[in-house]
Image (cartoon, rainbow, N blue to C red):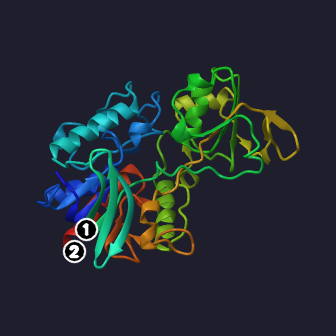
Amino acid sequence: MHDGGTVPVVIIGSGQAGLSVAYHLRRAGLTAGRDFVIFDRGADAGGAWQYRWESLRLGEAHRVNDLPGLAEVGLSFETADRTRPARDVVTEYYRRFEEHYELNVLRPVAVRSVFNRNADLVVRTSSVARGEQETLARLLVNATGTWGAPFVPHYPGADRFQGRQLHTSDYTDARQFAGQRVVVVGGGTSAIGLMLELEGIAADLTWVARRPIEWVRTEHLDPEGALAAVAKQDEAARNGLALPSIVSGTGVPVSRRIQAGIDRGTLVARPMFAGLEETGVRWPDGSVTAADVIIWATGFRPELRHLAPLKLRTGAGGLAVGAGASWSDPRIFLAGYGPQASTIGARRAGRVIARRLLALL
């Protein structure tokens, strides 16, 4: 049990990146609660996956790589039941992983801010069980991912639209849109999944994307394309720039299900609309498509608001990060940021960051 006080390392977040770091610290002989503590705002294990909609299943478009040491628990996502909701599978596997390695994740605990007090980092948290607390740390690993910072771009007339607007993070079930006219905005796998799920349920369905969809005619991502996309993320992170989209650099693999949707004419994206009207979306030619609902499948941004007091952000809008470490403050590590954002990237980052933490302790 951890009740404030001082601890060498604080890890914020228990998704893939946070658990990967914690695993390698445990392998090195450190003890959770004494040598490091993990704060997580979720009510259960599973990271952001616990919030995904019920119908989402594990597959090529939504794949989860195994945590390091997951095989020792007797589990693998490669053999997971793909008929079950992905959120249930990931939550179960991560919970068993946490228990096996005695990680003692403290949840639900919200990290409100991180700031300096002399030579220490102060992590201010709040929870129903413990109230407001401060924990002093020598080193900090931020592994909060992006789920808590959904991105909705601004378009003219957005405040005038009288229908419902929601982000994919708010989406729960297609049935609530039965008989409604729905516009899905976005060019990634979430937008595609929503289009296929809403087909035949919504009265009218329109898909729009900011750039043309680059279909990859294989069910597996091209390794060279994936490496190039990760390299762009790494370059942006090292230079403190806003991070580019991974999908924009790799394209979308065409599974049999997706190909069938293309053949039916469902997965045909229109260029972006010019703005919103009270009753729908207005196209560049002035025509209007009536809509009751707009779903913004427009992705997320890194969730870093709690780190604002540390003034890590550059003038270019990002954080200068190399190999998981902040270049402006050597006490701060960002697991799962930039090139580490994929599940396999987060796994590899865990080992690298843990080694650097151990060297500093």
Q: Quadrant of residue 174?
A: top right
Does the CB distance between marks 1 and 2 fall below 8 Å? no
> 10 Å neighbourhood of mark 1: few (<14), some, or many (≥20)?
many
**Residue beneath the point at 20% across and 64% down:** 7
Which residue has dot 2 on it? Answer: 360
Residue type beneath disc 1: Ala
Residue 90 percent coordinates (x, y): 33, 37
**Callout 2: SS:** helix
> 10 Å neighbourhood of mark 2: few (<14), some, or many (≥20)?
few
The answer to whether one can see residue 122 in this image is yes
Residue 302 percent coordinates (x, y): 48, 57
Q: CA distance from mark 1 to mark 2?
A: 13 Å
Residue 350 percent coordinates (x, y): 29, 59
Which residue has dot 1 on it? Answer: 137
Farthest residue to the left: give it.
Answer: 29
Q: Nearer the viewer, residue 70 or 283?
A: 283
**Residue beneath the point at 33% across and 27% down:** 81
329 on left or right of 19: right
